[in-house]
Amino acid sequence: MSLSEEQQHVLQVARAEVLSGRMSRRAFLRLGLALGLSAGATALVACGGTSTPAPTATAPIAAGSGPTGRLRVASEIPVQLDPAFASSDAEILILNHVYDYLVDIDATNAVVPRLAREWTISEDGLRYRLVLAPGVTFHDGSPLTAADVVWTFNRLRDPALQLPTADLYANIADIAADGDNAVVFTLAEANPFFLYDLSDNHALVLRAESENPATAFNGTGPFRVVEYRTENRIELAANTTYFQAGKPAVANLEIIFFADQAAAVDALRGGQVDLVLRMPTPLFQTLQQESGIVTVQTPTNGFDLVRLRADREPGNKPEVIRALKLATDREAIFRQVKAGLGAIGRDSPIGPLFSAYYSEETPLPPRDPAAARELLARAGYANGLQLDLHVPDSGDRPDLAVVLKEQWAEAGINVNVIVEPESVYYGDNGWLEVDLGITGWGSRPVPQFYLDVMLVSGAIWNESRFSDPEFDALAATARTTLDEAERVRAYREIQRILIERGPIIIPYFFAQLSAHRAGLRGYVAKAFPGRTDLATIAV
Amino acid sequence: MKLSRFVRAFFADLATATGTTIVILFLGLALFGPLIAPYSPTRQNADAIRLPPSTTHVLGTDRLGRDLFSRIIYGARDILLLAGGGTILAVLSGTLIGVSVTYLGGWLEELVFRIFDGLLALPALLLALLLLGTVGPSRSGVLLVIVVVYTPIVARVVRSVVLSLKPRGFIEAARMRGERLGYILWRELLPLVAPTLAVEAALRFSYAIFLVASLGFLGVGVQPPSPDWGLMVLEARNEFALAPWSLYAPAAAIALLVIGVNLMAEGVRRAIREDVTR
């Protein structure tokens, strides 16, 4: 995702509104979801255009046999089901099967056709023409036309409606139907990542003039909603007239809600569900020993960010930042906290899966607590440094905090760990205010998103208040250039800067951990589990 | 009451003796923990993750490679200090309020005990969560919670005793003699409240242990990496199948200590009753 200057302006205004109390936390969170912040909530699917495919699965399903059987998938509890507000895995997992995106991102991170079967982009990168697949109908029988797409995207970008996507699509100058089966998007500024933006989690195509999208469930997707029992489960049945041949493979899909991931895993062991899309590391390790269950780990670009505010003491001293980095043993963290699942980080959000963009040119200095202690003394902390470390209680983050505390103590950095419920950590912008914190960032298909919302000067979620003119210029180049080689160069320099002086530590990238019962065919794991395609799975 | 007679009555019972031994054992662990514990409770070892019990790690290690035996020992100190300290404070404040306010009576008694009734209407754990949500999770927060949750209960118990004593002749006599309020409260009333108080304190102590452990388990009590037993149970919950010992050790410690304290409380109650009936 990339943000134009105009979009950035909107974000900055929004930030100011929030900080001054004029914008509600709820509205801010909605805006947040548009940009995909909360721990993977609005993230898209795996890795960079140049990454390795997820090493999953299984034989393709024979076409023409017709959907048979029932697939039961465990999920967290969805809060609401209007696509425009969908944010969690659970919500997007359901909506992704009731509706369709114009384009999709596959497990190898490539943009692939969905409702749009082909597209052309003008030379200047401003005009995108997408041709819709023929013969697509909504579940109520009405045909899909370009007007539906125009209506959907106009709704998503309408500033008056204050939808989370308004900023994302602020760069769109015009959306027009070109006949009944083609749509033209005209941009104000070139955006090399626009197709990824079109596949934003919220951008599911609705029927024009839909009045109550949260409850009508009138989509074009591979399944129709039969019954939705709030906080319990949702029953779906195959859309027998679905436009993609051979999909869905099962006749019935049941998504069962669990408040507790341990309970979902127990349901899988007990045979009450067939597939669990997400779980913490120890539960995954437990299932690895179980017969009759297949565990799947998929590398992702998601990471935990340890960051120190650089706009005030003690983070405004470069020696302190270097001391924290020197006191950290990323390899040990990776083993202790992540059990070696995922990848070791290098203090930059441009991870190894963004292979062409990722670089190991700049060496990461080896751990040296004594040198860290000296740096601290030079910065005026000869007697050590005392800091509160705020951490949300989700995932393996409390463990990360505890391991850091132990490692940093050797360098005279004494940390007081404060574990908070996620709602408290993110509530009232606490996470943006604290000096030292750990924030989870979900997986994104392109790295530019992280730079634009997290690291450029004044960015809306610049939690570390990092502000570096050289970095900003490089990020701007990478955001707008249509020359891929130039972007690669910019990203390499960015990684050097972040290793040398970024007030952030990224100790590891997550693996997406899922499991299903043996005998399930056609499951392809995705970095953002909500975007898993259940229509390819046969039981 | 003669102390020696009380002690004899107290230890006459096997269950009481067992309970007391358990409590003394844990007290010993708490007092001499650093001398007994083979490792630091927070020392991690990336090469010793989830080791089963062995001679080097008597109770095994947890997911970060920390020695569970050392954590249990240091955890004993934590929980006894918090639960014990909280109980003592709650008993002190509950007694002070219960004796004086009840004796004075009038609108003050009405006001204080209606407020206490209000607090008692809320389940202890809910009240604790509300309080910790306000003051934030910390050791002092947990201590405060125990005091606030148990003071009304102690005060109520004390009140019932004081109410039965208040109309008795010797109190009347003391008043007639022109004794000062302090004298009546501490010399006349308190000695007669004391036996009930002792039983109540022992009971409160066992509930306080449970409360501290519950708050730790819910993640709102003592913060990591403190070797809090409840917190250890919480952290071990997801990896039960991988390292059951990391769950069994803190769970057994909580159970054992609570059983010990309960047996002891029962002993106190019985010894006092026997002493009174004799």
Image (cartoon, coloured by chain):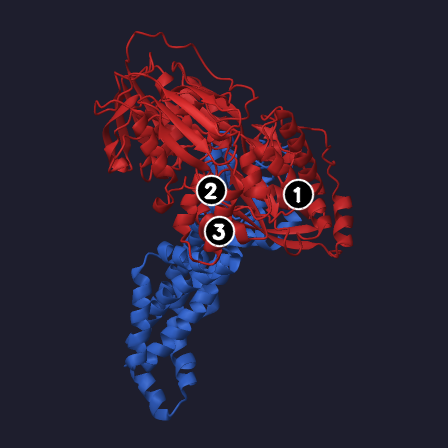
Chain colours: A red, B blue
Q: Position of residue A249 (x, y in %)?
A: 32, 14
Which sits in the foreground, B128 or B76? B128
Residue A467 versus residue A188 in the image, above or below: below
Q: Residues within 10 Å of mark 3 (few under 14, many from 20)?
A: few
- Mark 1 or 3, closer to the camera: 3
Which sits in the foreground, B161 or B152? B152
Q: Position of residue B80 (x, y in %)?
A: 52, 55
Examine the rendering and report whether any part of residue B166 can be seen. no
- Mark 3 or 2, closer to the camera: 3
**Please, what secondary structure does the residue beneath circle 1 have?**
loop
**Please, what secondary structure does the residue beneath circle 2 have?**
helix
Residue A406 versus residue A16 in the image, above or below: above
Q: Amino acid at mark 2?
A: Leu
Mark 1 or mark 3, which has the lower sequence index?
3
The residue at 67%/55% (across/down) is: A314
Query: What chain letter is assigned to the residue under label 3?
Result: A
- Residue hosting label 1: A502
Residue A363 versus residue B135 in the image, above or below: above
Which sits in the foreground, A100 or B7? A100
Pointer 1 with pointer 3, Cβ within 8 A:
no
Q: In the rendering, which numbered label is found on residue B234?
A: 2
Pointer 3 with pointer 2, Cβ within 8 A:
no
Is B159 positioned to the left or the right of A296 in the image? left
Q: Amino acid at mark 3?
A: Val
